[in-house]
Image: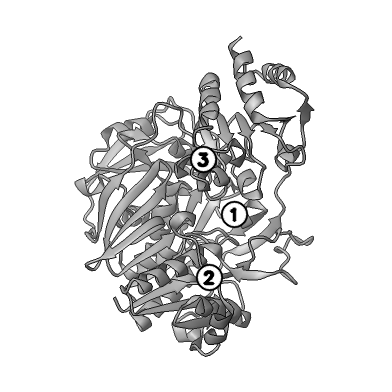
């Protein structure tokens, strides 16, 4: 195939302990390390492996966000993406607006396959792949843990509550990926230097047909209620007594 | 007034326990009428189970061989068509709902409210973000159709004893053929289902090997519990992925949760924080799991677990 498009979102790094702002308007992002959404990193890794097997000519990384999102796209280019597009947006966008932008990018770039993470670890919406597939009227596979491409089709195994489900979809298709699909590569220094020369284009929201961000109104953001620390028992006999008292035995 | 359509999840002629919980969530919206939609090859058995749920006004059934397996691309256009006469469409935040519901939302031209844990009104919902480290309250614009997935661990199942009428519909909706079902791994043995079990015994990296997991299975059997695992145990290959409890696995709310050899990483705690009682057994007294456990015991699990099982027998 000619092209794989990968969605890359800039999120608070997964190692950062997220704190809710005291005024309940959001979470603290000032001075916090930002990274590529880990699920998107897996999506990119999979696209690169497909290309390295000689099954695709080009891997295109796309993102939507503030100007600083260029950092994450440069990382994607350093990992091996051939070029990148940033759709610049300063404010919050709804999942439907995001999917609409992706639909527009698909129209421009005509990918044979779109791969994204199954969710972003900031808002945990998990909607982009399914919505793009709906707007594009193409197949979707959500939470892929294994993927094979051949003869214009993808055979994909996805993680479901009862185990694993395998689907066969015609390309082009949209696939969202789960943690166990692969382990993303580390970026090496020479690749970072090379990435600086790769094309990174910027588009405005108007360029991709968005006039209304459409985000839900955020009323408040609160910390979750904390569980209270309970009692420590010193041996199995005490544990059994405690379990009896609670009616479990 | 709110007219809510709940999309039923089912497999093998059985209604999934997630659906009665979606009905409860829908019933929390004042003055709501709640209908359940069953899409199946033959939905009769599932429809009668849905009709028995208290609070359900009507059950709609669409029988079509194309609905034999729940393919999102096939189900979504049918759901979107029926949703035209509803204000809200709810599905469970299970792998079934996470797959199909955003596709429905997009066909209806709206965003989805994902994983709602409380419905404060017909338009105001609370949902977890950042793996449950923050709770976001949102307002869906008035007049817009509401599409939501329901966090099943946050709601009790609707009672049975109802007797709602069942209506069979025929839809004239073009369905795609670009997606084909190949296979689904069989559900695990005779043990209780992890998602809905009232008792769960989970093992972590501390269990050390697939073979050692035998003691977890054995204790679970003694307690009539389902078996779960931390992501570390799944990633280490001790047990299959469908046993994973946590933000990226199953989010559960059992009466009893026993965490054995599990340190209690945030992503694991997100999956169990609605458990009624948490018992933790870990050799590291500083493990974060003890901060959230109702009962904690520090020690070697390979001594404690067999001894516990012996005392439970006696």
- Looking at the rendered structure, the secondary structure element under dot 1 is strand
Q: Which mark is residue B124?
A: 1
Which chain is disc 1 placed on?
Answer: B
**Is A107 in front, or is B297?**
B297
**Is A13 in front, or is A214?**
A13
Tell me the residue that label 2 is attached to. Answer: A214
Q: Give residue A218's position: percent from left, percent from top.
A: 64, 63
Whether residue A55 is visible here, answered yes or no, is yes
**Mark 3 and mark 1 residues within 8 Å of each other at the beta carbon:** no
Q: Is residue B258 left or right of residue B238?
A: right
Q: Is residue B229 above or below residue B100?
A: above
Whether residue A65 is visible here, answered yes or no, is no
The residue lying at 43 percent from left, 31 percent from top is B53
Q: Nearer the viewer, mark 3 or mark 2?
A: 2
Which of the two discs, 3 and 1, labels the residue nearer the N terminus? 3
Q: Give residue B187's position: percent from left, percent from top.
A: 37, 36
* Name of the residue lying farthest toward the top: B314
Question: What is the spatial separation of the Cα atoms under label 3 and label 2, in whole angstroms?
Answer: 27 Å
Mark 1 burial class by Cα count in 10 Å: few <14, some 14-19, many 20+? many
Mark 2 burial class by Cα count in 10 Å: few <14, some 14-19, many 20+? some
Q: Give residue B44's position: percent from left, percent from top.
A: 26, 34
């Amino acid at each position: 195939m000619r092209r794989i498009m990968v969605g890359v979102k800039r999120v608070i790094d997964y190692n950062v302990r997220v704190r809710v702002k005291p005024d309940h308007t959001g979470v603290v992002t000032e001075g916090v390390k930002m990274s590529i959404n880990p699920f998107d990193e897996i999506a990119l890794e999979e696209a690169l492996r497909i290309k390295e097997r000689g099954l695709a000519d080009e891997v295109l990384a796309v993102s939507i966000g503030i100007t600083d999102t260029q950092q994450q796209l440069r990382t994607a280019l350093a990992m091996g993406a051939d070029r990148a597009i940033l759709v610049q947006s300063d404010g919050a966008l709804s999942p439907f607006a995001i999917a609409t932008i992706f639909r527009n990018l698909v129209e421009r770039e005509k990918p044979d396959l779109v791969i994204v993470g199954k969710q972003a670890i900031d808002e945990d919406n998990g909607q982009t792949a399914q919505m793009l597939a709906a707007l594009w009227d193409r197949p979707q596979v959500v939470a892929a843990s294994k993927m094979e491409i051949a003869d214009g089709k993808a055979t994909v195994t996805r993680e479901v509550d009862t185990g694993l489900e395998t689907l066969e979809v015609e390309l082009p298709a949209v696939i969202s990926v789960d943690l166990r699909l692969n382990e993303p590569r580390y970026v090496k220094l020479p690749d970072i230097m090379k990435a600086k020369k790769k094309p990174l284009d910027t588009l405005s929201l108007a360029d991709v047909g968005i006039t209304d961000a459409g985000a839900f109104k955020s009323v408040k953001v609160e910390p979750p209620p904390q569980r209270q620390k309970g009692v420590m028992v010193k041996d199995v006999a005490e544990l059994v007594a405690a379990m009896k008292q609670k009616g479990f035995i | 007034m709110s007219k809510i359509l709940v999309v039923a999840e089912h497999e093998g002629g059985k209604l999934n326990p997630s659906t009665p919980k979606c009905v409860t969530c829908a019933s929390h919206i004042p003055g709501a009428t709640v209908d359940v939609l069953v899409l199946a090859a033959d939905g009769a058995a599932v429809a009668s189970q849905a009709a028995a749920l208290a609070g359900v006004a009507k059950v709609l059934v669409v029988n079509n061989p194309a609905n034999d397996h729940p393919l999102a691309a096939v189900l979504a256009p049918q759901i979107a068509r029926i949703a035209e006469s509803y204000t809200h469409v709810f599905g469970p935040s299970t792998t079934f709902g996470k797959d199909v519901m955003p596709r429905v939302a997009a066909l209806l031209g709206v965003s989805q409210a994902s994983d709602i844990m409380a419905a404060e009104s017909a338009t105001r919902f609370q949902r977890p973000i950042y793996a449950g480290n923050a709770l976001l309250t949102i307002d869906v614009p008035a007049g817009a159709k509401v599409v939501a997935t329901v966090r099943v661990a946050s709601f009790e199942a609707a009672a049975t004893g109802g007797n709602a009428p069942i209506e069979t519909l025929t839809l004239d909706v073009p369905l795609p053929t670009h997606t084909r079902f190949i296979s689904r791994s069989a559900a695990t043995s005779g043990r209780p289902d992890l998602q809905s079990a009232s008792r769960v015994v989970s093992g972590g990296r501390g269990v050390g090997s697939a073979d050692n997991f035998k003691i977890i299975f054995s204790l679970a059997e003694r307690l009539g519990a389902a078996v779960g695992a931390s992501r570390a145990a799944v990633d280490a290959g001790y047990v299959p992925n469908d046993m994973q409890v946590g933000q990226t696995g199953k989010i559960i709310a059992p009466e009893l949760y026993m965490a054995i050899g599990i340190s209690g990483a945030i992503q694991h705690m997100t999956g169990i924080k609605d458990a009624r009682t948490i018992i933790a057994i870990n050799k590291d007294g500083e493990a974060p799991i003890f901060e959230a456990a109702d009962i904690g015991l520090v020690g070697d699990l390979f001594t404690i677990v067999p001894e516990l099982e012996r005392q439970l027998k006696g």
